[in-house]
Amino acid sequence: MARSPDPTDAAVGVDELFTDEKAPGERAGRRSKQRNAQRHRQGFFRTIVQILGELLITAGVVLLLFIAWELWWTNIDANNAQQHAISAFAKEFQGPVAPVNSGAEPKDFGPPVVMADIDSPGKVFGVVYIPRFGATYSRPLVDGVAREQLDTLGLGRYATSTMPGGIGNFAVAGHRQTHGAVLDAIDSLVPGDKIYVQTKDGYYTYVFRNNQIVLPTRADVLLPVPTEAGAVPTERFMTMTSCNPRFGSEERIIAYSLLESWQPASAGPPAAIAAQVAANSSKG
Amino acid sequence: MYGWIFRHLPGPLWFRIVTAVLFIAVAILVLMQFVFPWLSQFNPLNDSTIGGNATP
C-alpha cells in the first residue's frame, strides 16, 4: 500500500472499502451505524485528505493500467490488425505460393521490376519476411511512417524513399516495442541474413550488411546512398529504422541491407520463406 | 470517496457489488479505447522514425 502522510487516514479509507464489500449483510448495518458516528467526528480536513488519497491511489492504478496497455495490449491489437492485413494482401496476390522448379540453379530474372511509387499512406503493398526474427515472421509493408500506419500496420515505408528493388534507398520504419514490436530483434541480425520483401510483382531478397546507432536527427541515413549527401546511387539499398535502446528512444538503430536477387511472382517464393508464404495465403 | 459512492448505490449488497464491478469495467474500457491511445502520442518510446516525417 502507498504510504500517506497520515497513516490513520489512509487506513480508515481502505478499511471502509473492504468492509463494504466483504461484510455479510446483517453485520453491514451495525458497521455502517458505527461508521456514521465516526464520520461525524471526522473533520472537514480529514475528508479532504481521504478523498485526495483515494484520487492519488486511483492515479497510480491508472498509470499501471496504461503501462500494461502500452507494453502488452497494443501488441495484441497490432498483431491482429497485421494478421488481417497480411491475409488481405495474400488474397489479392497473383502467383504460385510454392517454389516453381526448386532445386534447380537459381535463375537470373534480370533487373528487378520496381512498382510505381504508390504514394497512398495507409495502403498495404507488401509483406516482409525475416527468417532471423523467427520462421513465421511476416509483417505487412505499409506506405507511410505516420503514427496511424506504424501503430497498427507494421513496417512503414518512408514516402521519400524508393519502392522495393529500386536503385537508391528503400527505407522502412518499425516499432521496437509496443504496437506489434515489429523490429524488436533488429539488433540480432547478422551480416548475410536475408530479408525478403514480397510485393504484387514478386520477391526481392535483400542481404543484411551492417547496422548503425545514430541520433534521432540523423535523417541522412535515408538518403539514396545512406549518409552520403549528393552521391548518385548505383546500388539498391534497404534501410530499416527503429528505436534504440529497447524501452527507450534516445537513439535510433539503423539496419542496412543490399539487394541480392529478385524473382517475379510467377517464379514462386524463395524456398526459405515458401512455407510462410503458403501459410499466409491459406489463412486468408 | 469510493466508500461514499458504494454506500449510495441502490439495491442489496450483491447488486451494489455487481454495479461497482460494472462501473470499473466501463472505466477501464473508456481508458483503453480513448484515453490511452491519446496519451500514447506523448510517449517517446513510440518514436521509431528518423528526423520526423517531413525530412528528405
Image (tube, rainbow, N blue to C red):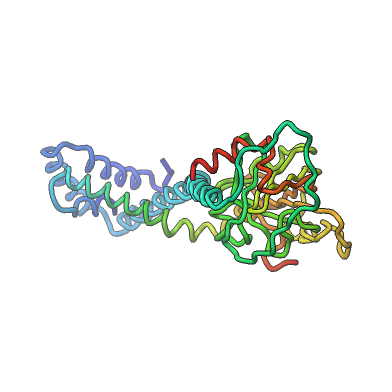
Residue at x 79%, y 35% (from the top left corner): A105
B42 in relation to A107, above or below: below
Residue A284 screen position, x and y as percent: 49, 45
Of A52 and A40, the residue lying toward us: A52
Q: For residue A212, say whether it is visible.
A: no
Q: For residue A64, say whether it is visible.
A: yes
A259 in relation to A218, above or below: above
Total numbered labels: 0
Residue at x 55%, y 42% (from the top left corner): A280
- Quarter of the image with the N terminus of chain A is top left
Of B43 and A180, the residue lying toward us: A180
Residue at x 73%, y 58% (from the top left corner): A114
Residue at x 69%, y 47% (from the top left corner): A203
Q: Quadrant of residue A225?
A: bottom right
Relative side of A17 to A99, left or right:
left
Relative side of A68 to A159, left or right:
left
Residue A51 screen position, x and y as percent: 33, 55
The residue lying furthest to the right in this view is A231
Q: Quadrant of residue A119?
A: bottom right
Of A72 and A46, the residue lying toward us: A72
Relative side of A150 to A165, left or right:
left
Residue A23 screen position, x and y as percent: 19, 37
Of A7 and B55, the residue lying toward us: B55
The residue lying furthest to the top in this view is A103
